[in-house]
Image (cartoon, rainbow, N blue to C red):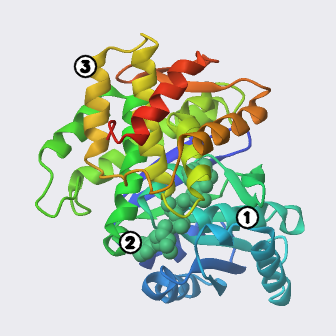
Amino acid sequence: MLKIRLKTEQKGYPVYLGRGMIDKIGSLISQYLPASSMLVVSDRNVSPHYGERCLESLRSAGFKPYLEVLDGGEKDKSLTTALTLYTRALQEGLDRHSAIVALGGGVTGDLAGFVAATYLRGVPFVQVPTTLLGMVDSSIGGKVAVNHPLGKNLIGAFYQPELVVSDLDTLNTLPMREFNAGLAELIKYGVIWDKKLFKRLEFFGAKASSRGLFLEVDNPWLLKCIARAVLIKGEIVCSDEREKNLRRVLNFGHTYGHALEAAAGYEYYLHGEAVACGMAMAARLAVLLKILDQASELRIRALLTQLKPPSPPQGLNYDTIIEALYFDKKKELGELNFVLPTALGRVQIYKAPPSRFVEQVVEEYLRDELL
Ligand SMILES: NC(=O)c1ccc[n+]([C@@H]2O[C@H](COP(=O)([O-])OP(=O)(O)OC[C@H]3O[C@@H](n4cnc5c(N)ncnc54)[C@H](O)[C@@H]3O)[C@@H](O)[C@H]2O)c1
């Protein structure tokens, strides 16, 4: 088991990484929280595997846990579902000393974290991510949110957990497509921050198994790669908790990626897949802008191609993507900004690149030329 300590302005907290952690969760949490009641939030794919085991471990450590199982999926990140959780917490008599535990992927973590940040003006919160994306990204850094009909993650807070417990064994039941979506985020850290990690992932990509998996769940290196991602995200977030500056580098692939998700209607791509496409597009844009050499671009795109992100859906057209790109720009005070690679392991924020290049990349993507 590995323990990584993160320190933000709000607070410091540990991230535990290892295998067989679900059955130890009660004793781990009891080192940080007093015995109290807690609401464990999960979804119907995760709960049958880990819900009861998690509750049993919590009970044997003296906690009084209640389990709330959601349908799961992006539509659950809503104020309506948050209301269901507030109601359950009130009915079970959860008070300021009670905690909320998120057992699931990024959807569960974002939603349960939002409820923890707002229930009784804030109660302790524990993240137990069960997706790779959750382990390397969404459980780290304290961004919690629900969606608004007009856009994703628009209602939220910065609210750090008391601890994060990632059990890699839970990845054994994660569908391969979801696992690959998480690998996209690992590649992101390699491109924005850590050339060594990028090269390590390239090495695994070259040896991809016959089942097509990029990096198997039981590969001992997976723990090291996740730990590296946690350290990188931790370092970035700790120096810029509220996304004023440095934290924006984590948005590599997200400008194009969000536009693809919005244009395709949020159901077609998994978030990590849209980010994978967005990263390939950003690398291409960087070459057109002459800030990245072509060899590096090809290496980035070759690695992303191994994840087999879906091709553009039938009917997705240029105008809808461009519209979605420029809609996002309103949130950035009128500027369309991109995080672009300048070398492997290094990125810069590029403000308002010429629209002909931005649009050329969209055309190339739609012709299925990038991945
Ligand atoms: N807060 C942040 O900083 C941050 C960062 C990145 C993404 N996010 C958010 O995270 C969300 C995406 O997260 P996600 O990709 O984890 O999606 P998710 O929570 O929807 O999980 C993906 C799917 O896998 C299932 N699942 C999860 N763990 C499983 C397991 N171990 N075994 C079997 N099935 C399992 C879920 O039920 C779901 O169907 C998005 O809403 C995104 O906005 C947040």
| The image quarter in which residue 212 lies | bottom left
| The image quarter in which residue 238 lies | top right
Relative to 256, does residue 123 appear above or below in the rendering? below
Relative to 296, does residue 34 appear above or below in the rendering? below
Q: Amino acid at mark 3?
A: Ala
- Look at 72% across and 57% down and name the residue there: 145
In the rendering, at what x and y percent does residue 98 appear? Answer: 76, 74
* Residue underneath mark 2: 170
* Mark 3 or 1, closer to the camera: 3
Q: Earlier in the sequence, mark 3 or mark 2?
A: 2
In the rendering, at what x and y percent does residue 268 appear? Answer: 50, 61
Relative to 30, does residue 151 appear above or below in the rendering? above
In the rendering, at what x and y percent does residue 42 appear? Answer: 58, 78
* Residue underneath mark 1: 124
* Residue underneath mark 3: 295
Q: Earlier in the sequence, mark 2 or mark 1?
A: 1
